[in-house]
Image (cartoon, helix red, strand yellow):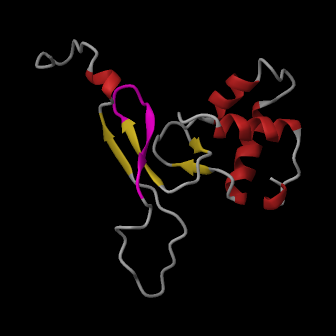
Amino acid sequence: MRAAGIKPSLQRIAVLEYLCSRYNHPTADMIYAGLHPQMPTLSKTTVYNTLRLFCQAGLATSLSIDCQNQRFDGHLHPHHHFICTRCGKVADVPGQGKEAFPEWPGYEIERSEVSYFGICPDCRNEPDADNPHKK
């Protein structure tokens, strides 16, 4: 955090540790719910402000994959995402963010988001009453 110009606080450290220790691409509300039992003085406003600060400083990314909730990723290595259209699970998919983008004179890519949508293994293995063709 210091290298990014952010003054560490107990709340900021907890949010960053939570975000970097999970691969479920949590929402701000999920982070709050996960931290609040151990930090009862933590507010949702602090979580939202901290996530915004981390995204501005390049310590996290905000994902535009869910129109209802903004999701966050603390893993900054280049990768894509798979989103299950049934349960909403978000999983990392290995890949480079810029590999398929052609060079365009005058354009500079700062980051990219590639998302794949489909059915995750857990949902594929569940019985589905709406789909009579399902095994």
Frontmost residue, 117 versus 94: 94
Say which residue appears at 55% left-offset and 69% top-offset.
110
User: Percent x, y for residue 37?
Assistant: 77, 17
Q: Relative to 62, is 48 on the left or the right?
A: right
Frontmost residue, 3 versus 132: 3
Say which residue appears at 88% left-offset and 42% top-offset.
9
Compared with 30, 94 (above or below) is: below
Residue range of the region highlighted in magenta in the rendering: 84-95
Query: For the view shown, which residue lies furthest in the left direction?
Result: 133
Q: Is residue 61 magenta?
A: no
Compared with 122, 17 (above or below) is: below
User: Percent x, y for residue 103?
Assistant: 39, 81
User: Could you say which quadrant of the image residue 6 lies in?
Assistant: bottom right
Q: Relative to 81, is 133 on the left or the right?
A: left
Say which residue appears at 76% left-offset and 44% top-offset.
50
User: Percent x, y for residue 131?
Assistant: 17, 19
